[in-house]
Image (cartoon, rainbow, N blue to C red):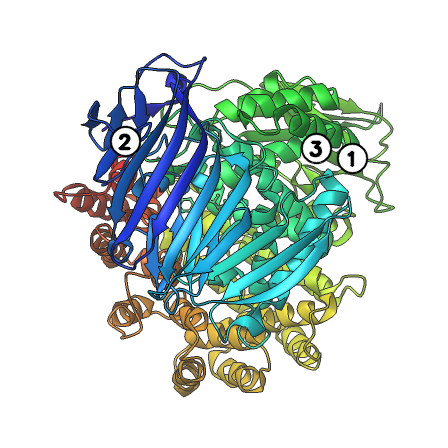
Amino acid sequence: PVVIQRADYRPPAWLVPDIALDFLLDLSATQVTATLDVERNPAGDGGPLRLNGDGLVAQSVAVDGEPHSAWRMEGDDLVVDLPGEAHQVTIETTIDPTANTQLSGLYASGGLLCTQCEAEGFRRITFFPDRPDVLSRYTVTLTADKAAFPVLLSNGNPMDSGEEEDGTHWAIWHDPWPKPSYLFALVAGDLVATRGTFTTMSGREVELAIWVRAGDETRTGHAMRALIASMAWDEKVYGREYDLDLFNIVAVSDFNAGAMENKGLNIFNTRYILADPETATDGDYDGVEGVVAHEYFHNWSGNRVTCRDWFQLSLKEGFTVLRDQQFSADMGSAPVKRIEDVRVLRSAQFPEDSGPLAHPIRPNSYQEISNFYTATVYNKGAEVIRMMTVLAGSERFRAGTDLYFERHDGEAATCEDFVKAIEDGAGLDLAQFRRWYEQAGTPQVDVAMTHDAASGSVTLAFKQTVPPTPGQPVKQPMVIPLRTALFDRASGAHGGEHLIVLNEAAQTFTFDGFAQAPVLSLNRGFSAPVAINAPQSVDDLVFLAAHDDDAFARYEAMQQLVVQHLVAAVEDRLDDAARAAGRAAIAGALGAILADPALDDLMRGELVMLPGEAYLAEQLNPVDPARVHAEREALKAWLGTELGDAWRALHDRCSAVPYGLDAAARGARKLKTQALVYLAAADPAQTALRAKAQYDAADNMTDRQGALMVLCGLDGPQREAALADFHARFADNRLVIDKWFSLQAGSLHPKALDHVRALAQHPDFTLTNPNRVRALYMAFAANPQAFHAADGAGYALIADLILALDPINGNVAARFVAPLGRWRRIEPQRAALMRAALERIAAAPRLSRDVREQVSKSLE
Ligand code: HT7
Ligand code: ZN
């Protein structure tokens, strides 16, 4: 395979300051004429003009207006020999958007035409130096049949438009901001707009429009509010002002990812735009708000300052994830948002870091860049920058980001540029900190606390190790900032937080003034993305779960209490007495949380959540997923019985709260379904009735989906009735039918695997729509009980999917390899079956580069 190395970066030989693109749009034969003003790059190697292509055929090549023959194809690339320093190169191609099932480049989606160019989709549209360090001003002319494509959109500002007598019309768009080709976009189709306006901090009026299919416009209000709030927030918090007169968003049903930040023309998966109470859960509302903000924030962190090459992806993605996390924290409950973000990191990124696909947030090599849009680059990337905020404090960090934007506006920058700007602007020394960009793997921090009663001193002894990862057997110590507090047991208070910054393999820190051994609260707010091993007593964890004034630490203590117990149970380390004592401690802590009047329900909802099976599995090596599942379910059932009255009372109390988008009502909805989850494990028959009652009474999707989720895991007439009703009620709404697939595939039902097989044959199922594929199969792959069926049937199902999907959409197919790739950490019998599934995929005669890379790395 061709492996691209970060160290091989060379500046482009030619620059393209301006490009004119002419599209004669048609669903199956779109003609593209690209006119590139090219200039030799003084920093280049003097070589020929290399124009990347992917499956394109040049119909004509002209230079300075004359037909040109001094060009050749090198693989998919078109290479032109040019005599002078500056030329105009014109190339004509024809592409078939309907045949484009990969959804990269120009493709058709339900009669619409739209583009997705990141990372390397532009080369599927026209020949171009398709690399992010070639920045051009785009002028785009779109011509299409007016009846079929009444709306014609591209980046920047509309310049002119008109109609022809043959039924076609045209529009010219000009984007004054130089941008890389991955930010190019066009949309043509029959769409309606919801409009808004925003006045920027310098008083400019910006028109906002969200384009959707007719009928969907009633569900765009939340997205529009989120957009306006994001624009205001970025001005206030980062001093960033929007820079065009118009901001368009288009929602499409067929999309490989969540959304795309194309300059002035964001294209979204409908899933992250459309929301109303009847069809979207509270989680969906948060998803819309977060993704709208994320894409908007890219206008500065990604577009105005872009990436030099794709190894720098975390420069824009890590920083933008941090920015969207900070925004969402400011919009709602900051502690709850932090807990959610850490949960995502632990369930998605930690397993990546401990598996065969582990890579640093700035990778060193890749075969297919689409495989590097990962939780590591995005979420760990955000955590790394978040640590800079911890080290610098928010004011100095802001000085650093101001300097970064000032220094690099209009440039294609590197992660190193970012770190240097923070270093200079915030006045930090980040020399050793840079290892976070170089080393993969989740650092493990062991801590031991000793107390000397005579001197009143407390010593914390730390050891850090970064586990070996592919290609990186030996690691150096990292900079690890740990927000720490030492609680006095008697008063339940602490005398102020300390920031302990680890930077060596072993270190000790001493604190004085403790007559009694304190209770240690470490990594508060999850100040560093590490795994902490601090053997804390059950009593200390119960204390912190009840008293810690850091909300995250309180959650963490509760999680740790359960993790310690379940890990011991799975490892057969508990006799009857120890099991009873462990359960009693958990029930006591949980009961206290349920009864604590000082807690709001949103936070209570976090504290009562059991750690997920993926996170539990990370604590065990090798892991028997069936044991983890069985122990966790058994504990849940026991807690459901033990606290049965409290759960029922909670469900009754929360059911009486009317629908609203305020925190109290949202908290009530969250708890309502959690109460059902515990009760269903304890008393399935009675809870089926309670869940069905919740389903029938639901006036919103959060309650309805929560009830259906619980019912899906149970047997009986209520399950079938609710599933049938749900499908009939929402048959016309694709996003809600996705939920119908997903709830069944992710359910606790012992026959979930059979259900998935049957659902794959359902008339509503299709492999051509990524949302539908993910709804069924990602939910299944994340369902440990079903995916890890002892006979390997779950692994075979995912392997079959990958083989069937790969020729249609290799990018989406490759996403399903990671669950199989975790075989090394699974018990031997299942591991062999997982490996066999991977080998079967590897043996296929034709695989996309995407799947090939993931499978071969997973087998190494
Ligand atoms: N920057 C965008 C990435 C993206 C993408 C990547 C690979 C394949 C399809 C894709 N669609 C969008 C999204 C973002 O992070 O904002
Ligand atoms: Zn992004």
Cα separation, mark 1 vs mark 3, equals 31 Å
* Image-quadrant location for residue 363: top left
Instruction: Return the disc, 3 or 2, that comes first in the chain's sequence.
Output: 2
**Badge nearest the viewer, 3 or 2:** 2
Looking at the rendering, in which quadrant would you find the N terminus? top left
**Picture residue at 58% right of the left edge, 35% below the top:** 304
Residue furthest left in the image: 845
- Residue 186 place in picture, x, y as percent: 43, 51
Relative vertical location of residue 687 with respect to residue 636 in this rendering, above or below: below
Check disc 2 and report its element: helix, strand or loop. Answer: strand
For the point 25% across and 53% down, which residue is it? 96
The disc at residue 62 is: 2
Mark sitting earlier along the chain (1/2): 2
Judge the density around disc 1: few (<14), some (14-19), many (≥20) Cα neighbours within 10 Å.
some
Comparing marks 1 and 3, which lies closer to the viewer?
Answer: 3
Does residue 860 appear anywhere in the picture?
A: no
In the rendered view, tell whether residue 745 sits above or below residue 124. Answer: below
| Quadrant the C terminus occupies | top left
Identified at 19% across, 26% down, the residue is: 69
Q: Which label sits on residue 517?
A: 1
Q: Element at badge 1?
A: loop
| Viewer-nearest residue: 511 or 147 | 147
Name the kind of residue labelled 1 in the image.
Ala
> What amino acid type is highlighted by mark number 2?
Ala
Instruction: Locate residue 574 relative to residue 764 in the image: left or right.
Output: right
Name the residue beneath numbered marker 3. 389
Q: Nearer the viewer, mark 1 or mark 2?
A: 2
Task: From the viewer's perspective, tell me whether residue 643 is left or right of residue 59.
Answer: right
Please report whichever mark, 1 or 3, sits nearer to the chain's N-terminal start. Answer: 3
Quarter occupied by residue 745: bottom left
Residue at (38% x, 32% y) in the render: 36
